[in-house]
Image (cartoon, coloured by chain):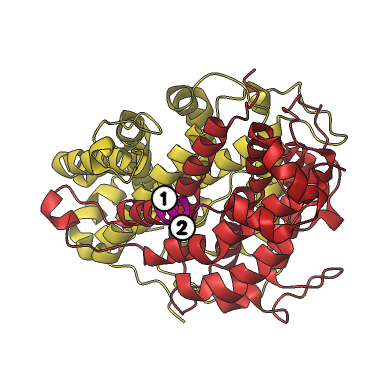
Chain colours: A yellow, B red
Amino acid sequence: MATAEYTLDSVRKALVRQEDTIVFALIERAKFPFNSLTYDHNYLQIPGFCGSLVDFVVNNTEGVQAKAGRYKNPEENPFFPENLLSSLVPSYPFTQILHPGAASININKSIWKIYFHDLLPLLVASGDDGNYAQTAASDLSLLQAISKRVHYGKFVAEVKFRESPQDYEPLIRAKDTEGLMKLLTFKSVEEMVKKRVEKKAVVFGQEISLNSNDDKKGKSKFDPSVASQLYEKWVIPLTKEVQVEYLLRRLD
Amino acid sequence: MATAEYTLDSVRKALVRQEDTIVFALIERAKFPFNSLTYDHNYLQIPGFCGSLVDFVVNNTEGVQAKAGRYKNPEENPFFPENLLSSLVPSYPFTQILHPGAASININKSIWKIYFHDLLPLLVASGDDGNYAQTAASDLSLLQAISKRVHYGKFVAEVKFRESPQDYEPLIRAKDTEGLMKLLTFKSVEEMVKKRVEKKAVVFGQEISLNSNDDKKGKSKFDPSVASQLYEKWVIPLTKEVQVEYLLRRLD
């Protein structure tokens, strides 16, 4: 058994590793064109189901993964919690370091909106290749990776709080959202994260050939700036939103 | 609409792009330890279901994707075809270039055995972190990527056949499996593919930091030689097996 440890260092490492997962998932979604019928509410005609093909795939795949125990891990947060059946697997002793209030924090509805409204149009080419199920499956992988990263803010906030409760407690008691946000913001770290993510996007996105001169021609599987934009505009601010939400409940 | 074109060049490009998908999926599975309970037939107790957690996740996720139309694309082949419901989406005009006999070729049973018996033990570290649902989901992504690559042999065989039917027809009529295998084998190309895959595994597997000197220390998210072994021992031979199977039916 290797239960997760949560320390400032382990949390930092987990966040760095999750960047790779997000970049891979961006590249894999960008393999398909937009495939707008995946998102069209009038396309699917399934008795008893109302929604688009991506709604159908995400809902039902989350259902399968829920039964298999995915959401027993406090690091995971579903997009459609209202529809989930309970886990059918024996429970596993996941490390519980979060305040119980953490369970009520789920901002996947915001992530969902941003994903389809803002991110996808930046990421993918227009067009239709008929691979709607595969497109929806790769949407789900990317959504899950982004959601995990953003909600990891709960763990970030907890380890920061434990490091220096004296800095946080007065702000929490005063419900000083702005003060908490300020305390959690390190512009230079955020800049570094953005730059590292863009570098990962360049390296993992490049077309590799055996002749190493060819690699430098800069052909890429997607636009690497989309990865840093994703972090700058959405992942970093939403993670801080989760941290603040968590801290506001931390002394309840 | 951008229906797929199948030419020697487009097929080659698709195979090269699929290498990236396979390497990403290897890295993502290697993020989790072995998690043996995922594969334990005595672990799950689901009424009406007999099998391991990975059987459950793959069966049911394939079921969702089948309803969403995944297997209408002749490039896709399910692992559990016996359990699939039909697609619930309107049909899409996928390019049909394969001989109808192609539909009966599905060697996913071999891929499944090799995956769990040979590949996984090479790829992942021992241990258990409780993330069985996530492990099974990443097994499925990797299995699907390998399966797609191997069954792409049908398209490879078809475009090769169309280029020079005169070379293939006598061997097909004589059911000369060995002769066909010889005609399909280009050792130098296979060597190049293996090397390119290993290079991709090195580049995509490396831990990227902003200080570029650090990148060269060679820390990796997995053992890159596993990717080239996968190609050498299984992907390349199985793809040729699919090609031969396809060609043997080509004149029916």
Chain at tag 1 = A
- The amino acid marked with disc number 2 is Glu
Residue located beneath label 2 in the image: B28
Give the residue at x 64% y 75%: B39
Q: How far across and how far down the image is residue A98, in percent?
A: 41, 63
Chain at tag 2 = B
Q: Are marks 2 and 1 on the same chain?
A: no
Left or right: residue B7 versus residue B53 is left
The answer for how far apart the CA atoms under marks 2 and 1 are is: 7 Å
Question: Magenta stretch containing residue B190, yes or no?
Answer: yes
Is B128 in front, or is A150?
A: B128
Query: Against A29, is A92 above or below?
Result: below
Left or right: residue A70 versus residue B228 is right
Q: How far across and how far down the image is residue A46, in percent?
A: 84, 33
Left or right: residue B117 versus residue B79 is left
- The amino acid marked with disc number 1 is Thr
Left or right: residue B167 versus residue B30 is right
Q: How far across and how far down the image is residue A120, in percent?
A: 49, 27
Mark 2, residues whose alpha carbon is within 10 Å: few (<14), some, or many (≥20)?
many
Residue located beneath label 1 in the image: A21
Q: Which residues are magenta?
A: B186-193
Query: Against B46, is B165 above or below?
Result: above
Give the residue at x 83% y 44%: B101
- The dominant secondary structure in magenta is helix
